[in-house]
Amino acid sequence: MKTCKSCGEEIIDSVFDAGKQPISSRYLKSHDEKEDLYNLELGQCLSCGLVQLIDPVPIEELQPIYKWITYNEPEGHLDDLVSQLSLLEGINRKSSILGISYKEDSTLARFASLGFANVERLPMPKKILEDFETVGVETVQNYISSETFNYPPENDPYDVILIRHILEHAYSPGSFLKSLKKLAHNNSYYIFEVPDCSLLFSSCDYTAIWEDHILYFTPSTFKAFLKKAGFSVLKYHLYPYPYENCLIIIARIDDAPRLNSDNSQNIETSRKLMINYGKNFLKNKDATREKLQQIKANFGDIAVFGAGHLSTMYLNVMNISDLISFVVDDDENKSGLFIPGCRLPIYNSKDLLEKKIKFCLTSLSPESEKKVIAANQEFLSRGGVFASIFPSSPNSFINST
């Protein structure tokens, strides 16, 4: 029996089994290249409601094999966030600001532009820098969670500690948070930011599951998780985005014993949400295939724009590669490679015209989708159509006529 990564209870219930899946960042160099597959299954703790991977992929398998692999997080809210953080009680231009990984770099730059001189990213040990060509969040969280992590005693504790989009990657979140407490003093502020999975689950979006994400938060489970880990929630804010909101909690260490609060209503609501998510998969999978068959009959060959982990999961979990001709991505590093799992080739956007594609699915953020549409006006002028794979998008292909 698996143990919950938040409350420690051994009552994890399976809610969605995606079957055996590839590592989405391991693009294939040839169509017949051998690859390993891993079980990918979402479970939910019946005690605290937290959704989590039941049996995560071995962490060493997540180390990117390509140095050019990067992941971008939403940043439209950061100006407002940094402005609010700069006004926190006790914070001034001399305050020390620490970012945990490269995902805080743009936030640290915003602090610096406001006159904060004492900003830095957590340094990695020399051995890690020597052993790994790239240091992603999977490596950072593993280092922080390790027993060898030791806050350098010659350094003063930090006043503000930024933890953006890394908590959901933590294999041992209890150890991860325990180590972070070594970086602080009693009045330090922790700024936690995680993606909100509520809309993904409620809209039955099956790109939500990803081997890199161990934990899947909603507003209620995010708050409960941090309280359980010994933090007091000072402020909570939700920044809305079209597909996946950003959840922010400003917290302080509070290891005082506390009574368990009655969270049964939130847990029951979350439970119903996840039961619905799992129950509707086969229906949505069948509807997806039926719709794409109709589109293929009307438009001919279909392509997918965006060769990231979202399209990889979508193509594989929906088992629709037989209905797709190729995947498009203008990242030159990906050109000529093949999508893990389904092994579809990756081409340049020019191939939409050269191969006379009339219907192209997109697996992009709204901002990126707008840029792609603007850059491919000739495709549109020739009668081409872009439509999103995301069910919550106004431009979702599943709702097209």
Image (tube, rainbow, N blue to C red):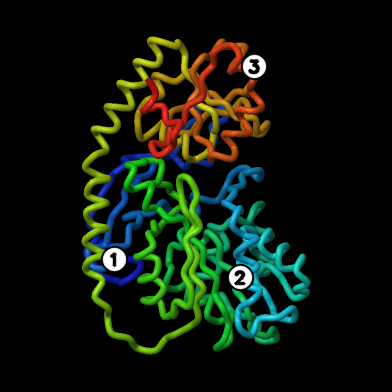
Going by the image, does 275 lie left or right of 327? Answer: left
Mark 1 = which residue?
3
- The amino acid at mark 2 is Gln
Question: Could you tell which of marks 3 and 2 lies nearer the N-terminus?
Answer: 2
Instruction: Measure how far apart labels 3 and 1 are at the Cα level.
Output: 54 Å
Quadrant for the N terminus in the image: bottom left
> Residue 99 location, x and y as percent?
64, 68
Residue appearing at x 68%, y 85% in the figure: 156
Instruction: Measure how far apart labels 2 and 1 are at the Cα level.
Output: 37 Å
Labelled pair 2, 1 in contact (Cβ < 8 Å): no
The 10 Å Cα crowd at callout 1, few under 14, some 14 to 19, many 20 or more, is few
Which numbered disc, 3 or 1, marks the residue closer to the eye? Answer: 3
- The amino acid at mark 1 is Thr
Which numbered disc, 3 or 2, marks the residue closer to the eye? Answer: 2
> Residue 332 location, x and y as percent?
68, 31
The 10 Å Cα crowd at callout 3, few under 14, some 14 to 19, many 20 or more, is few
Going by the image, does 210 lie left or right of 151? Answer: left
Instruction: Indicate the secondary structure of the residue bearing disc 2.
Output: helix
Near-viewer residue (306 or 80) = 80
Which numbered disc, 2 or 1, marks the residue closer to the eye? Answer: 2
> Residue 235 location, x and y as percent?
48, 74
- The amino acid at mark 3 is Glu
Mark 3 = which residue?
378
Residue appearing at x 68%, y 69% in the figure: 123
> Residue 239 location, x and y as percent?
50, 58
Mark 2 = which residue?
84
Quadrant for the C terminus in the image: top left
Near-viewer residue (62 or 180) = 180
Instruction: Indicate the secondary structure of the residue bearing disc 3.
Output: helix
Instruction: Indicate the secondary structure of the residue bearing disc 1.
Output: loop
